[in-house]
Image: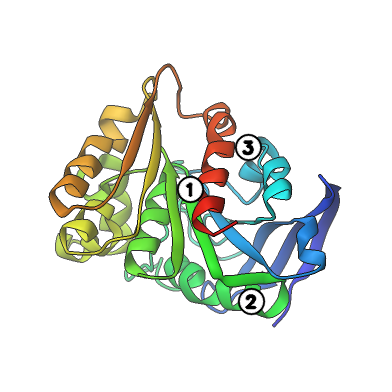
Amino acid sequence: MSFEVVSQSRCFNGTQFVYRHASQETGTPMRVAVFVPPQARNAKVPVVWFLSGLTCTEENFTVKAGAQRVASELGLMLMAPDTSPRGEGVPDDPEGAYDFGLGAGFYVDATQEPWVRNYRMRSYLERELPALIAENLPADMSRQGITGHSMGGHGALTIALRNPGRFKAVSAFAPIASPVNCPWGEKALSTYIGADRFAWREYDACALIEGGACVPDLLVDQGTTDSFLESQLKPQLLAEACAKAGQPLTLRMQEGYDHSYFFIATFIEDHLRWHAERLSL
């Protein structure tokens, strides 16, 4: 299987691509934005994944975060997949809510109808897309980092915790720290996964850490004026889980910052340099 090039643009001496491919996991066409740095002309380069949040596509991070300049300097390939399956016949929230359905795949493998056929973002990101990247791009899959924002921060943390050893660097921007304990998570998990709250725990970073999962280190940035801070994100639960388990965590409460891409653009360079250090660059 190979990628179809949707677009490509020269960017900071590298190339910003958008690819499309047919996904067996989701049963739909999927798009992924990939920044290939200039160093990839001569050798395989490390990969940093960015998982986006509610309502986003592969485009948001690519055009708003301003990450390519630093990635070009450091020789990092940036991978920004879509957040959910899309296309004709893919079910959506019947009321058109922003926090469920299209744009809100929550990085789970759904088990409930009618979501079970298409909403398989966990398997797509843990198995299918990495294999496709390794086959088609100059990516050093032995050196991977992962980060994400909000729902994507939840995805980054849980994917890393469920796949020990795969990611040498893990970070997040304003992640949904404990989906089992917030309205966004309860809505998504109860509908995609069902009523058994124990089954939700594999999609909750705090529960995974409490159960013994760990990564070498965590960096989390959270804005103090984020309108979702208290009701949905709850970084204090992540801090408590990490402290109890001995999981290294650097939690930075960034004064005056909100939930927007202005926040991400401000701190993305910090995160990429943090990843590069752990990827031995």
Quadrant the N terminus occupies: bottom right
Position of 170 compared to 189: left or right?
A: right
- For badge 2, the amino acid type reads Ala
Q: State the residue position of label 2.
A: 134
**Residue 2 point in image, percent of width and height:** 73, 78
In this rendering, does residue 141 appear at all? Answer: yes
Q: Secondary structure at mark 1?
A: strand
Mark 2: few/some/many CA within 10 Å (<14, 14-19, 20+): few
- For badge 3, the amino acid type reads Ala
Residue 148 disc label: 1
Inter-mark Cα distance, 1 to 3: 12 Å
Position of 155 compared to 37: left or right?
A: left
Identify the residue at horizontal 23%, vertical 60% (top origin): 208
Q: Are marks 1 and 3 in contact (CB under 8 Å)?
A: no
Q: Secondary structure at mark 2?
A: helix
Mark 1: few/some/many CA within 10 Å (<14, 14-19, 20+): many
Q: Secondary structure at mark 3?
A: loop
In this rendering, is residue 209 above or below 22? above
Answer with mark 1 or mark 3, whichever residue precedes in sequence: 3
Q: Residue furthest top?
A: 256
Q: Are marks 2 and 3 in contact (CB under 8 Å)?
A: no
**Residue 123 point in image, percent of width and height:** 45, 73
Quadrant the C terminus occupies: bottom right
Residue 65 disc label: 3
Q: Quadrant of residue 109?
A: bottom left
